[in-house]
Amino acid sequence: MTTEQLATITPDKVIDARGTACPGPLLEAKKGIGAVKVGQIIEVKSNDKGSRKDLATWSSKVGHEFLGIVEADGHDRLFVARKK
């Protein structure tokens, strides 16, 4: 997905993990993914650059789809689609 496409997504759940260091954003994503249905999307807001790799790796490892990242004002918006 392109950055422009990602920027237009309305996520089904937004998790604000800004201000938390690794592994905080990943742990919040793990909790949050259970709150949405299969096919729905979560957005994780994080200012920890390690979240980029952590969320992508975790998503593929557990069977979800990491859609990508949009850089925002001082943080990243990371999108994951629940697949199972």
Image: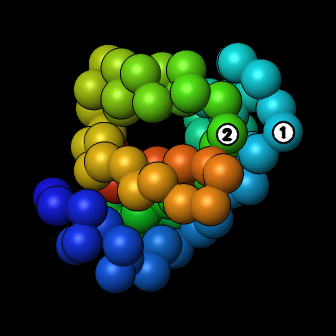
Identify which residue, 21 or 30, lies in the foreground. 21
| Residue 35 visible to the viewer | no
> Where is residue 45 drawn, in percent x and y?
63, 52
What amino acid type is highlighted by mark number 2? Asn
Quadrant (top left/top right/bottom left/bottom right) for the C terminus: top left
Q: Is residue 10 above or below residue 61?
A: below
Locate residue 14 relative to residue 38 in the image: left or right.
right
Quadrant of res 53: top left
Locate residue 33 relative to residue 66 in the image: left or right.
right
Instruction: State the residue at coordinates (46%, 54%).
Output: 71
Locate residue 77 relative to residue 3 in the image: left or right.
right
Q: Are marks 2 and 1 in contact (CB under 8 Å)?
A: yes
Q: Which residue is mark 1?
A: 19
| Residue 18 visible to the viewer | yes
Query: If you read the primary sequence from the N terminus, does the residue marked by circle 2 or circle 1 appear first?
Result: 1
Count neighbours of disc 2 (C-alpha within 10 A) and say few if under 14, some if 14 to 19, many if 20 or more: many
Identify which residue, 79 or 41, lies in the foreground. 79
Q: Is residue 59 above or below residue 8?
A: above
Q: Which residue is mark 2?
A: 47
Instruction: State the residue at coordinates (82%, 32%).
Output: 20
Count neighbours of disc 1 (C-alpha within 10 A) and say few if under 14, some if 14 to 19, many if 20 or more: few
